[in-house]
Amino acid sequence: MSSLSCSWAVPVVTTTTSSPPFSRKPSIAKRTQRFHVSCNATNDDDQNAPTSSLGKFERRNLLLGLGGVYSATQLTSNPQALAAPIQPPDLSKCGPATNLNTGQQLDYNCCPPLTNRIIDYQLPKPAVMRFRPAAHLVTREYIAKYNKAVELMKALPADDPRNYTQQANIHCAYCNGAYDQVGFQDLDIQVHNCWLFFPFHRWYLYFYERILGKLIGDPTFGLPFWNWDNPKGMTIPPIFNDTKAAIYDEKRNQNHLTSIIDLGYNGKDSGNTPLQTVANNLNIMYSEMIRNVKVIEDFMGQPYRAGDAVNPGPGTSERGSHTAVHVWGGDPRQPSGENLGNFYSAGRDSLFYSHHVNVDRMWKIWRELRGTKPKDFNDKDWLNASFLFYDENAQLVRVKVSDTLSHEKMGYVFQQVDIPWLKSRPQARVQKSKVATTSGAPTAAKVKFPLTLDKIVKILVPRPKKSRKQTDKDKEEELLVIEKIEVDTTKFVKFDVFVNDEDDKIDELDKSEYVGTFAQVPHRHKGPVKVKPSIRLGLTELLEDLDVEDDDSILVTLVPRAGDVTIGGIKIIYAST
């Protein structure tokens, strides 16, 4: 523990713009005042605190001295100004995103048009509800309407923020290093691999949908969801394969146009039978939505605050089915799987939006599975995190995460369909297996970390607690933690995790021994391309199924699937539910 106290004056710049709407180079008047900042002591072990030559200090203090959305006026009038949520980007400082293939600046600009007016968005009370249908069940009338809306969006002027390309660029800008964090010019905003993943994309779809609806004069229009979690919807919806349709994109994997999707996709086709693929898919969904997500961070993603580096850790759905669909649908003929196969170009394919409507539906279902009182983060740094979007009237608006907690209040509902994975709790290959005690694998304490996963690795991991009572299980989830996973963000990377797997049937993901995965969609950001997120995998239910709750250790099998991976450690912890 160390202490630190200091005080210094920092220039605070207030800007006003006098440019017409959509001008990319506004005239900016600057007024500078002096503002005193004081430092507070922090624990030396706080790995997230920003540093200076003076030592570690609180991120919140740094924000206070850097101006932007934080000013002296806000300090006296708004107690929440002391929080550190991710703030909306300064569009006037938007820069070129980074080319995934070369590491250089892209040859086009993802930045949106500039305007001199930003308003705080207030959710309108829905007069009618927008209806989001399952894409494989839509009518001919709906197909015509959807294609007409996209056709009109593509026909808008190139500098209209509602234009199809401008809308695709939203994902590019927020995900590939175009935006700095306010107050942290060396850190970019990244809405993936953290707790912003679900709310950001919910807002993104919300305005995209409203723009399409206004263009065709239909306030009930809703985007279709690609029902890839249901066997009836596990192929690319036929409406997206019509080569003459506005929603068609030629940059897709031509071998997958009519194939059953593989939610455990490794970058190459597995060779499994369709029956095995469907079985795998259902268990993957069960694992992501039920088995591994009793603790909210494990579904939503890890906290990400102003001043944090990117990629603290994705939730189960993001790193699992979400990533698999992106990479499975991308075109291997393109340098980086364009369009769907990476972040900077994904929004150019209309299939992307239907994919993410289903991801959004997963958030809705997960909350409903929590009962009458859905579990959400109560952390103000999450609730007050905010973004900028253009609405259906081409007005730039500021929105907050706190307004995304009810899709009904946002004015849309989903078509009701069967959810077969709810009843797909897997069975163990071998019950009452004591494989951990006879495996001969090294214990985690004897493994030299960091460990490169260039082959299948087996590690014996001790359990701090065993034979727990049900009351203890209800209070705490037993979690397998794989930490400091070093990967290159520009590559598709994936590995799978099994527990007490005697048979090593690594392509059969429909058994209890399969516990989960880590995977990422290729993208690039500022700074080093290598990041070190961590993941957590639920063990409580799995150990019951294997009937090994009284074992001292579990045998963890790590199976590399794609890309170069190094892990920094592995252990078991217990987290409050």
Image (cartoon, rainbow, N blue to C red):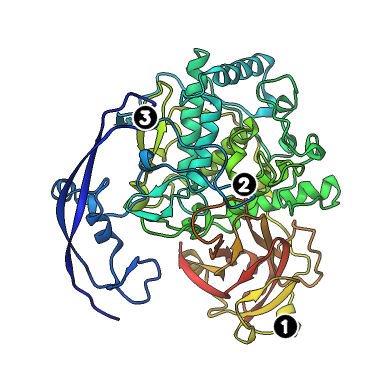
64, above or below 164, in the image: below
Q: Disc 3 or 2, which lies upstream in sequence?
A: 2
Q: Disc 1 or 2, which lies upstream in sequence?
A: 2
278, above or below 487, in the image: above
Look at mark 1 in the image and give the residue it sits on. 441
Q: Residue 212's x, y, as percent?
A: 52, 21
Tell me, for residue 45, which label it has, or none.
none
Q: Residue 572's x, y, as percent?
A: 55, 74
Look at mark 2 in the image and give the residue it sits on. 322
Label 2's element? helix
Q: Quadrant of the N terminus?
A: bottom left
Question: Residue at position x 82%, y 70% from top?
Answer: 503
The residue type indicated by label 1 comes to Ala
The residue type indicated by label 2 comes to His
Task: Select label 1 or label 2 by which is in front.
Answer: 2
Look at mark 3 in the image and give the residue it sits on. 396
Q: Disc 1 or 3, which lies upstream in sequence?
A: 3
299, above or below 506, in the image: above
